[in-house]
């Protein structure tokens, strides 16, 4: 995510805490930017975990595997 968008998220968050508050358009923009940020964060974390290995005490390396989702998740 671009730094410009992160700065805008922060700007809207600060404005929301003031007495002035956010307009409806700003609330919509804030929600869209937050969703984009969360999706970017999740993708980055997934990529990092995809390249993570566990080193066992005997020196062997094991690639992390994604757990299968059960019916409750």
Image (spheres, grey):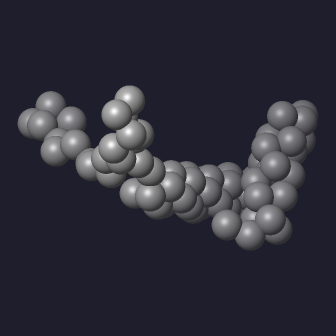
The residue nearer to you, when weighing 12 against 63, is 63
Residue 68 placement: quadrant: top left
Residue 68 visible in the current orientation: yes
Vertical order, 26 against 59 (above or below): below
* Residue farthest right in this picture: 19
The residue nearer to you, when weighing 60 against 66, is 60
**x, y percent for residue 14:** 86, 42
**x, y percent for residue 29:** 67, 61
Judged left or right of residue 4, residue 45 is left
Judged left or right of residue 2, residue 18 is right
Judged left or right of residue 54, residue 18 is right
Judged left or right of residue 42, residue 63 is left
Q: Quadrant of the C terminus?
A: top left
Residue 46 placement: quadrant: bottom left
Seen at 74% across and 70% down, the residue is 2
The residue nearer to you, when weighing 32 against 40, is 40
Residue 21 visible in the current orientation: no
**x, y percent for residue 60:** 33, 44
* Residue farthest left in this picture: 71
Seen at 27% across and 49% down, the residue is 65
**x, y percent for residue 67:** 22, 43
Seen at 44% across and 51% down, the residue is 52
Give the mark count.
Answer: 0
Q: Quadrant of the N terminus?
A: bottom right
Seen at 35% across and 47% down, the residue is 61
């Amino acid at each position: 995510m671009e730094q410009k968008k992160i700065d805008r998220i922060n700007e809207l968050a600060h404005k929301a805490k003031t007495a002035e508050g956010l307009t409806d358009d700003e609330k919509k923009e804030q929600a869209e930017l937050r969703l984009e940020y969360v999706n970017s964060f999740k993708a980055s974390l997934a990529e990092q975990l995809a390249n993570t290995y566990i080193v066992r005490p005997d020196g062997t390396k094991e690639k992390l595997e994604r757990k299968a989702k059960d019916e409750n998740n």
